[in-house]
Image: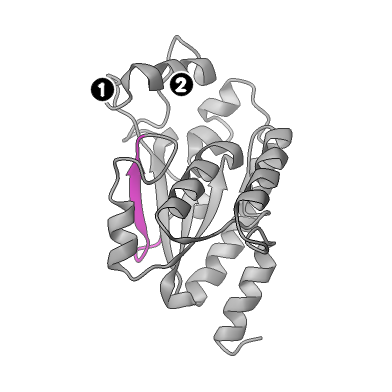
Amino acid sequence: MSAHTAVLVVDMQNDFCAPGGRAHRRGRDLTAIEALIPRLKDFLTQARAASVRIIYIQNSVRPDGALSGPADLVRRAAEWGAEDPLVTLPGTWGHRIVEDLAPKPQDLVVPKFRQSGFVATNLEMILRGNGIETVIVTGVATHACVEATARDALTRDFYVVIPRDGVAALEPQLHEAALLILEALLPRGMVPKAAEVEAIWAAQSGKA
């Protein structure tokens, strides 16, 4: 399993997840995301120990909005404010992955420009080139970029796993609603707790 599995870490960036980032400055409650970070850090440690490929999906925009398009700019304005709808600008602190989850040299980073990590990116090429058959989607937000990436992975015939405690959202009710949808969408057992996935890795490496 490990050789054909990749963990996708979606949008764990300062603007979305850290005190002082855009979400925090707009008065959003980071409680659920702050609780996710240490859990996800441990999960990634276990993944690396099992030689599982880790790929960070990093939301990226241009200062002039040229990569966003009118419809996407309208969506961003509704979420982040019409006065400055662009978040996660490359080269800024807000664009960086949160410090506790910073990529290691062996990890890969894929810029994304829409909610799904597959739209107009080289993610699928990377997965196919590395012989990946199963993607474990983690990060934020459960009902948005996590779900969008999971759906696109499924339609591309990847096995999809969503650790229910490896994802989060600013709004708990949307997180819970998304988990219900994902449980209905995916085969039974594909929305487990992270510890269940870690136990499989440990068993395969003879550490159980």
Residue found 35% across the figure and 66% down from its top: 106
- Quick one: 198 or 114, which is closer to the camera? 114
Q: Earlier in the sequence, mark 2 or mark 1?
A: 1
- Looking at the image, residue 195 lies above or below residue 102: below
Query: Which quadrant is home to the C terminus?
Result: bottom right
* Residue 60 vertical placement versus 56 (above, below): above
Where in the figure is residue 166, as x and y percent of width and height? 62, 54
| Residue 179 to residue 199: above or below | above
Q: Which label was assigned to residue 66?
A: 1
Residue 122: percent from left, percent from top:
28, 50
Q: In this view, does 36 lie to the left or right of 49?
A: right
Q: Nearer the viewer, residue 167 or 4?
A: 4
The secondary structure type at the circle numbered 2 is helix
Is 193 contained in the magenta span?
A: no
Q: In which quarter of the image is residue 27?
A: top right
Image coordinates of residue 30 in percent, x first then y, are 66, 35
Whole-percent x, y for residue 73 in the image: 39, 18
Above or below, 36 relative to 7: above
What stretch of residues is rendered in magenta?
104-113
The crowd level at tag 1 (other Cα within 10 Å; few <14, some 14-19, many 20+) is few
Image quadrant of residue 192? bottom right
Q: Mark 2 points at which residue?
A: 76
10 Å neighbourhood of mark 2: few (<14), some, or many (≥20)? some
Q: Residue at x 33, y 25 (%)?
A: 68
Q: Distance between the residues labelled 2 and 1?
A: 13 Å
Residue 109 colored in magenta in the image: yes
Query: Could you say whether the residue bearing mark 1 is in a helix, strand or loop?
Result: loop
Amino acid beneath label 1: Ala
Which residue occupies 48% across, 41% down? 13
Q: In which quarter of the image is residue 186?
A: bottom right
Q: What residue type is labelled 2?
A: Arg
